[in-house]
Image (tube, rainbow, N blue to C red):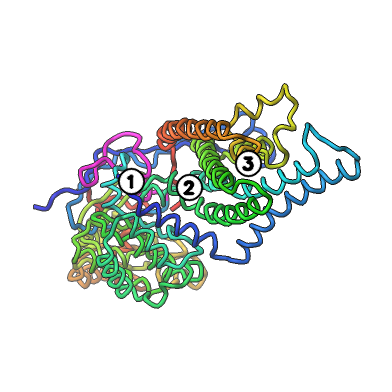
Amino acid sequence: MSEIVIQVDNVRRSFTSTQKGEGLKGTVELLFNPKVKSHDALKGVSFKIESGAFVGLIGANGAGKTTLLKILSGLIPPSSGEATVLGQKPFDRSLSFRHQISLVMGQKAQLWWDLPAVDAFDLLKAIYEIPDAVYRERIDTLAELLDVKRLMQTQIRRLSLGERMKMELIGALIHWPKVIFLDEPTIGLDVLAAHKLREFLRVFNQKEKATIILTSHNMDDIERLCSRVMIMKTGELIFDGDPNQLTKKGECRLRIRFMEKKSIEELSALSGVPADHIEAETTSETTSEGEDSNDSGAALPTAFFNIQRTEATKVLQSIMSKTSIIDMGIEETSLEKVIQRIYEGEPAGLVERK
Amino acid sequence: MLRLKWRIAALKNGLQDATAYRIEFLLQLIGSAGVPALIQWLLWYAIFKIGGQTEVAGMSYTDLLAYTWMSVLFSQVRGGDHDFALMEMIRSGGLSNYLLRPVSPVEFVYIRGVAEKLFVAGICLVIGMIASFAVGLNPLHLLGAMILALLGNIIHYQLGAMIATLAFLWEEAYAILMVKNMVVQILSGELIPLNLFPANMQWVWKMTPFYLYVYGPTQFALGRWNLTEFGNAILIACAWIVFFTVGIKVTWKFGIKRYLSLGG
């Protein structure tokens, strides 16, 4: 069994911030009677990660992902609970700890804006005490893999977002860290650049056995790279497991539009599908095609049946034998869809906690 | 172990960064040296040549002009604004970039920032030594004075780094750093020689380390301080550095716990 490199036990983190009311009154109040608001960013998160794992950390904005990464990389301490990375408390920030970790924040530049990347890498080489030959080899490998060899002498500020991100990644990996935290590394990248970056991360993880935690809003990143996914929602870890568990192999989503609105119980009786596998909607955005209203402009009731693909014909036949439908369609249960539904507040059923 | 390599590399990197825009660098250098000197010269000209004064606080027009031109060299070496940069990093979360690296962030920011000043100090030293030789002053005094000015540069940053930690508490320390710089401009001897202070007010500048930045080096370079006074000034500078080193360790130890690492 692989060794545990990251252990998080009941970690909580809260922040306080001063609130300013609207307009001049708010300004005066802020001066004389500031209101302080407390916010729990993490509410007792616990998990373990083994050496060499590639873990996806996902969640809607404000779910606590970045806060968790900041705690794990030693930037901020937890309010309570305990986190250890490589056997050390991150916030102690020992030299050996900082030699072995790396954090890349897609929205934050870490290299120096006015200097070419090669000058920044030279400085990092000295900081991490990397021998010349090893440094050359790493720079060549990383620049080759990310296809930025020709840009090494160009000022960072003159690079495109994707090129800059690749340079940031080189800067973050030049010391061959054992644990890498990637916070939305593909943000703003075009399809090709994102693909290259993903491919590079996959190879790096496999070859170097580095432990990687990746946060991303791009489900492609997660699906293609991560063998384990952790989902956070308002500071809590609500799922921790194999991403296939979420999409459930062979499952599909049968979408049917009816003439009249029906309750979940009625739909269950019509289809033979358990009620907790059915969702009903009557909104203006019921279908992906956007054909959501009848001729009179009224919204049509739509139901979604989460079933096995092999059951689709049987369920459809059962429904059509008892009532009329307007149309139907089968949607793949993609990770993105599942996550979207979780963000929207879908109660478990699909969601399991390890 | 001193781990000199990264420090040298940071100096090199800081100099590369400072000189990335050569014309801007040169204009800044010329402007910051020339303009204050010109203002002081106009002031002394008005007092002595138009106002008809022959002496101010025991100093003649020539004495004051000598002070003005010599002090310009040391004013260029006086601490820069990397304490402001540090404060802004705490405020905006940019400090995270430095906290992740296996180096001291306070020292790293200083070394990168001081690179430009060291380069300027080198130029000033050469100019000053040639000028000293030409007017009959001891060029070695100029060398000693420059060392004192560089110690002053360290003190200036250390004080700023300590003040910057207020940003951990209040998210902003700009005003205090600004006030510090204004006080420094007066009490360092950058604008006027400190012996122009009334006798009963001399204690004001003597109780701060600021006179070690410009006034002290200028006095020694002009031969107005003897070796004992210079030696004392060096010892006092070292004592301030030790004091602020401890101060920074304490304030950062407590401050960093409140760091929010905003952004990202």
Q: Is residue A168 visible?
A: yes
Nearest to N terminus: mark 1 or mark 3: 1
Chain containing the residue with disc 2: B
The residue furthest bottom is A150
Residue at the spot of label 2: B110
Question: Label 1 neighbourhood size at 10 Å, few (<14), some (14-19), many (20+)?
Answer: few
Q: Nearer the viewer, mark 2 or mark 1?
A: 1
Residue at the spot of label 3: B214
* Residue at disc 1, secondary structure: loop
Nearest to N terminus: mark 2 or mark 1: 1
Q: Is residue B82 above or below residue A300?
A: above
Amino acid type, label 2: Tyr
**Residue found at x 56% / y 40%:** B172
Q: CA distance from mark 2 to mark 3?
A: 20 Å
* Residue at disc 3, secondary structure: loop
Amino acid type, label 3: Val
The residue furthest left is A1
Q: Left or right of A146: which side holds B179?
A: right
Q: Nearer the viewer, mark 2 or mark 3?
A: 3
Question: Label 3 neighbourhood size at 10 Å, few (<14), some (14-19), many (20+)?
Answer: many
Residue at the spot of label 1: B2
Quarter holding the N terminus of chain B is top left
* Residue at disc 2, secondary structure: helix
Q: Left or right of B186: which side holds A248?
A: left
Amino acid type, label 1: Leu
Q: CA distance from mark 2 to mark 1?
A: 16 Å
Q: Give the image quarter of residue B134.
A: bottom right
**Residue found at x 40% / y 78%:** A150
In this view of the protein, which residue sits in the foreground, A53 or B237?
A: B237
